[in-house]
Amino acid sequence: MLVSGLFFMPVKNQNLAIIGAQWGDEGKGKIVDLLCGDFDVVARFQGGHNAGHTVRFGEHHFSLHLVPSGILHPHKLCILGNGMVIDPQALLNEIESLRSLGVQIDDNLRISESAHCILPFHAALDVAREEAAGPAKIGTTGRGIGPAYETKVSRYGIRIGDLINPPALKEKIDLACAEKNPVLESVYGKPKFDPRELYDRYLAFGEILRDRITNTCLLINESIAAGRPILFEGAQGTFLDIDHGTYPFVTSSNCVVGGICTGLGVAPKHIHSVTAVVKAYTTRVGGGPFPTELTDAMGDHLRKRGNEYGTTTGRPRRTGWLDLPLLRSASMLNGIDRIALTKLDVLDDCKEIPVCTSYKVRGSTWQTFPATTLAHHEYEPVYKVLKGWNRSTVGTRNFDQLPDEARAYVRFIEDETRCPISIISTGPRREETILR
Ligand code: GDP
Ligand code: IMO
Ligand code: MG
């Protein structure tokens, strides 16, 4: 039922990575949906149902959390890679809700046997820790992402493949409960989990998911060998990356392009180009440094006009001006070839648009983002004020039809980041897009 295919022509058999350049919610879902018509495979490589990717076209409106956005196009093979953490209950709920909206999900959705499971004690620990941290909390989505990745790295994780191996599943759930229950009860005063009940529940999930569980590493490399183009769908954003983000206010996976290699078992030479999704201003949800944040009426205006409320948790997103040092760092970390600039229309009413061009740090000027190593009060954003356009750009599909000032804004970002902007999004819908 859903319309497929668009006008973007990839170089034949070239694989494309789409990643977020800021703190998530840049509009990756829209851009993946826009471009994936020309790819055979769409694969997620990290994160879990902390992600919320919105796709809109015509009157359709989808929120995707675990399932790659390519699922809305018939005949795309969609893969949940080994680098993900998957809550089977959340996955089944999502599949059911997509089906109820008319989306076909059968053997077009495959799950890595090596991806790790999120169990209810992971989510309980996530929430309990955040409560205990008080004002120092990270502001996680409470989905258990951090604790699940911790268990993975501890080497006691329960993998998706274990769901169809009853003796292994039983042993691992017993062991996990023996460790996590005392922490939940004694450290946080929270209820414990019954290992037998969890075993029955997770075994049942395994039965339902059995036919989808496979060696996705092999599957994706067979696709590569067969010359079937692949689109890698990033979740979160560069500055939520566990290594390169604003630690500790980050997620627990590698959201940068390097995460594709480990999170899917794909060699770097098969990632042929990188498109970064950049919001025309900046948002983040949860705690952590945000140097260009607006806490005034303009911040409220951007939130309202941009409908900046989390797709996953509904929390209001923090809003601020565009940060070019952040984008320069993102370009360095990901080798960005092109930018897809989203939500340009949200700036339509701004008389002036300040853009952070550099940082003053202890008397010197920095062109890249300093927040990871320096305290918040040690750097100061330097702004250049650009003229607003005071005219609606909503739904514009032709670059030449944008107001002069909007074109100048786009060109300024290109000059300052040295990245071409090949897509400009002027509304949430698929069709509200300029391709250059
Ligand atoms: P993602 O996590 O990167 O996929 O982004 P989200 O879907 O969480 O958040 C982006 C929000 O902006 C969604 O509500 C989109 O429908 C919406 N959106 C995407 N592009 C545009 C645009 O160009 N203009 C406007 N006004 N909204 C957009
Ligand atoms: P998409 O894919 C925006 C943020 C949380 C929190 C931090 C850690 O839709 O862009 P976690 O639950 O991952 O341990 O939370 O990361 N966060 C996101 N922010 N978009 C996301 O995903 C996010 N996923 C996690 O708000 O600050
Ligand atoms: Mg989102």
Image (cartoon, helix red, strand yellow):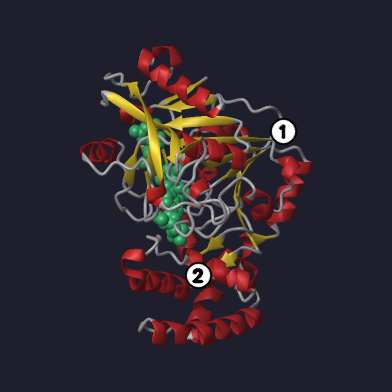
The residue under label 1 is which amino acid type? Asn
The label shown at residue 13 is 1
Q: Residues within 10 Å of mark 1 (few under 14, many from 20)?
A: some
Rendered location of residue 380, percent (x, y): 39, 41
Rendered location of residue 270, percent (x, y): 73, 41
Q: Residues within 10 Å of mark 2 (few under 14, many from 20)?
A: many
User: Is 139 displayed left or right of 112 in the figure?
Assistant: left
Q: Nearer the viewer, residue 56 or 158?
A: 158
Question: Can residue 389 be seen in this snapshot?
Answer: yes
Disc 1 is placed on an element classified as loop
The label shown at residue 147 is 2
The answer to which of marks 1 and 2 sits earlier in the sequence is: 1
C-alpha gap between disc 1 and disc 2: 38 Å
Rendered location of residue 118, percent (x, y): 51, 68
Question: Can residue 98 be seen in this snapshot?
Answer: no
Quadrant where ligand 2 appears: bottom left
- Residue shown at 53% from the left, 35% from the top: 328
How many marks the image carries: the answer is 2
- Residue shown at 62% from the left, 66% from the top: 210
Q: Nearer the viewer, residue 227 or 50?
A: 50
The residue sitting at the front extreme is 363
